Image (cartoon, helix red, strand yellow):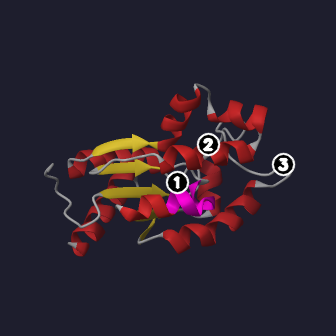
Amino acid sequence: MKKTLFKNKKSNIVLIGMPGAGKSTIGVLLAKKTAMDFVDTDLLIQLAVEDTLQNIVDEKGYMALRKIEEEVICTMDCSHHIIATGGSVIYSCAAMNHLKKNSLIVFLDVEYKEIVKRVTDFGTRGIAMKEGQTFEDLFAERLPLYQSYADITIMGDNKNQDEITREICKKLAELT
């Protein structure tokens, strides 16, 4: 069995949150700090379909992206990984239940105002949202879903990446 700094019955740590919350960036830092592997499910989706998330949304619609995301996540079989998910993963009970079997779910909670500052490329990020839906509406719709799946919630406002990573590690240590 691979030895890591994080010891828990559940061997993966899954990061959930809005686009711009820092899941991928924090995921890499957390993987280094915990001596775990890292995977970004957005990249797995792109590899599986050989296309970008934005092209999937543009050509097949946001529901197609969600379906592909669910399929990719439900076939994942890994342990001792930090997993950065796409922001829409919380719409799939099947995907979230699959992840929860072997993972602690960490919600990177960042206020709407801060997310809008961070995300400047809405038209190219492959954000799975209904036509005509505002980003603010999407944020309000997703927030209770993130909260419902979270084992740990980390407030990301007014903190840098290293501070967030240290806080996650502290919370994880408290669970062991």
Residue at 48%, 43% (x, y): give it: 41
Q: Amino acid at mark 3?
A: Glu
For the residues bearing labels 2 and 3, Cβ distance under 8 angstroms: no
Q: Secondary structure at mark 2?
A: helix
The residue at which mark 1 appears reads as: 21
Residue 131, numbered circle: 3
Structural crowding at the residue carrying mark 3, measured as other residues with C-alpha within 10 Å and reported as few (<14), some (14–19) or many (≥20):
few
Residue 26 visible in the current orientation: no
Task: From this view, report whether residue 46 is shown above or below residue 169.
Answer: above
For the residues bearing labels 1 and 2, Cβ distance under 8 angstroms: no
Chief secondary structure of the magenta span? helix
Task: From this view, report whether residue 61 is shown above or below residue 169.
Answer: above
Residue at 76%, 36% (x, y): give it: 60
The residue at which mark 2 appears reads as: 68
Q: Is residue 77 found inside the magenta-colored segment of the image?
A: no
Report x, y in % for residue 157: 50, 63
For the residues bearing labels 1 and 3, Cβ distance under 8 angstroms: no
Q: Amino acid at mark 2?
A: Ile
Report x, y in % for residue 146: 55, 67
Mark 1 vs mark 2: which is more N-terminal? 1
- Front-lying residue, 62 or 169: 62
Region rendered in magenta: 89-96
- Front-lying residue, 63 or 29: 63
Residue at 58%, 60% (x, y): give it: 90
Name the side, left or right, on which 57 lies relative to 100: right
Q: Amino acid at mark 1?
A: Ala
Structural crowding at the residue carrying mark 2, measured as other residues with C-alpha within 10 Å and reported as few (<14), some (14–19) or many (≥20):
some
Residue 34 visible in the current orientation: yes
Structural crowding at the residue carrying mark 1, measured as other residues with C-alpha within 10 Å and reported as few (<14), some (14–19) or many (≥20):
many
- Front-lying residue, 43 or 30: 43
From mark 1 to mark 2, how far is it between C-alphas?
22 Å
